[in-house]
Image (cartoon, rainbow, N blue to C red):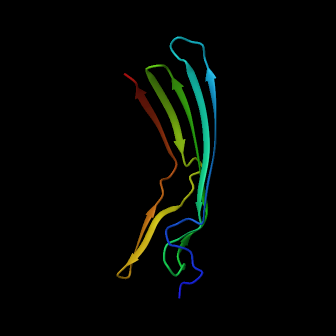
Amino acid sequence: DYAGNFIPYAPQHTLYAGASYTLRTGWNWLEYVIFRVAANGAGRIYWNEANTFSQPFYALLEASIRFEHRHWAVDVWGRNLTDTRYDTFYFMSIGNSFLQRGRPRTFGVSLSITL
């Protein structure tokens, strides 16, 4: 009997909060610098109908700085800045457990061009 149990793979709560600040430079070669920070979270997530396996609530922090011009933009970003360890998927089949871990702390640079 699973009465009163939570639906598997659906987080009980989700959270998102973000902020950005745009700085107009006044320079010909660079119009804007945009600072962004965001936090998102999910949990508790149950991995089976019996609610015996679960992922507790976790939160991820990300931030970026965007350098923008009319025809191009460069983003310098970081995700999961606190290097939170979390699971994105779990299931059991024929007595074997399968688990997918979330991405660790990641940094990158992205280039966008508008023609």
Place of residue 75 in the rendered image (x, y in percent of width and height, measured from the top left): 50, 32
Residue reaching furthest top? Answer: 28
Of 91 and 17, which appears nearest the observer? 17
Q: Looking at the picture, does residue 107 appear above or below residue 96? A: above
Place of residue 112 in the rendered image (x, y in percent of width and height, measured from the top left): 42, 29
Image position of 22 (left or right of 87):
right
Q: Looking at the picture, does residue 107 appear above or below residue 99? A: above
Residue 22: image quadrant is top right
Q: Looking at the picture, does residue 46 appear above or below residue 33? A: below
Name the residue rendered at 48%, 57% in the picture: 102
Image position of 6 (left or right of 74):
right
Name the residue rendered at 59%, 64% in the picture: 43
Name the residue rendered at 43%, 63% in the picture: 100
Q: Looking at the picture, does residue 51 appear above or below residue 71? A: below
Place of residue 94 in the rendered image (x, y in percent of width and height, measured from the top left): 34, 81
Place of residue 45 in the rendered image (x, y in percent of width and height, measured from the top left): 55, 68
Of 85 and 44, which appears nearest the observer? 44
Residue reaching furthest left? Answer: 94
Residue 55: image quadrant is bottom right
Name the residue rendered at 38%, 82% in the picture: 95
